[in-house]
Image (cartoon, rainbow, N blue to C red):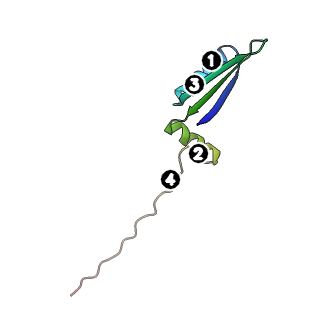
Amino acid sequence: MRFRHFTGHGPELDEEISGWIQDGADIHFMSHSQLADGTLTVCFIYQEGFAAQERRLTSEHGLSETPPVKPLPDPVHVESEGVG
């Protein structure tokens, strides 16, 4: 289980949360609170989907999204010797 929270107000907060949910989180619990100035804090307890977990682990370990592929060297041609 993981924890994530968002703080803000207005449509920007809604867009940020919606984008995160579409990333594949399996939400188990949600809570929210509001301050007097209208600022919302929305908290989630969730499990990550496979793709989201792979992106997080990749970014945490400083890896690029797609690993570089080294070109293969030119094949070496070997003459076969006849047996006989």
Q: Residue at x 56, y 40 (%)?
A: 55
User: Which residue is identified by label 1?
Assistant: 14
Q: Nearer the viewer, mark 3 or mark 4?
A: 3
Badge 3 amino acid: Gly
SS category of the residue bearing label 2: helix
Q: Is 40 above or below relative to 73? A: above
Kind of element beneath mark 4: loop
Q: Do callouts 4 and 1 mark residues in contact (Cβ within 8 Å)?
A: no
Q: Upstream in the sequence, badge 4 or badge 1?
A: 1
Q: Are marks 4 and 2 in contact (CB under 8 Å)?
A: no
CA–CA distance in space, label 1 to label 3? 9 Å
Q: Which residue is mark 4?
A: 69
Counting the numbered discs, the total is 4
CB within 8 Å, label 2 to label 1: no
Are circles 1 and 3 on residues that touch, CB within 8 Å? Answer: no
Residue ranking furthest to the bottom:
84
Please tell me in which quadrant of the rendered image residue 53 appears.
top right
> Which residue lies under the disc numbered 3?
19
Pointer 3 or 4: first along the chain? 3
Q: Mark 2 highlights which residue?
A: 58
Going from N to C along the chain, the mark reached first, 2 or 3, is: 3
Q: Are marks 2 and 3 in contact (CB under 8 Å)?
A: no
What amino acid type should be assigned to the residue bearing mark 1?
A: Asp
Can you tell which of label 4 and label 1 is closer to the viewer?
1
- Report how far apart the C-alphas of labels 2 and 3 lie in the structure: 19 Å
In the displayed orientation, state which residue is furthest to the right: 36
77 horizontally vs 52: left or right? left
Left of 39 or right of it: where is 78?
A: left
Residue type at tag 4: Val
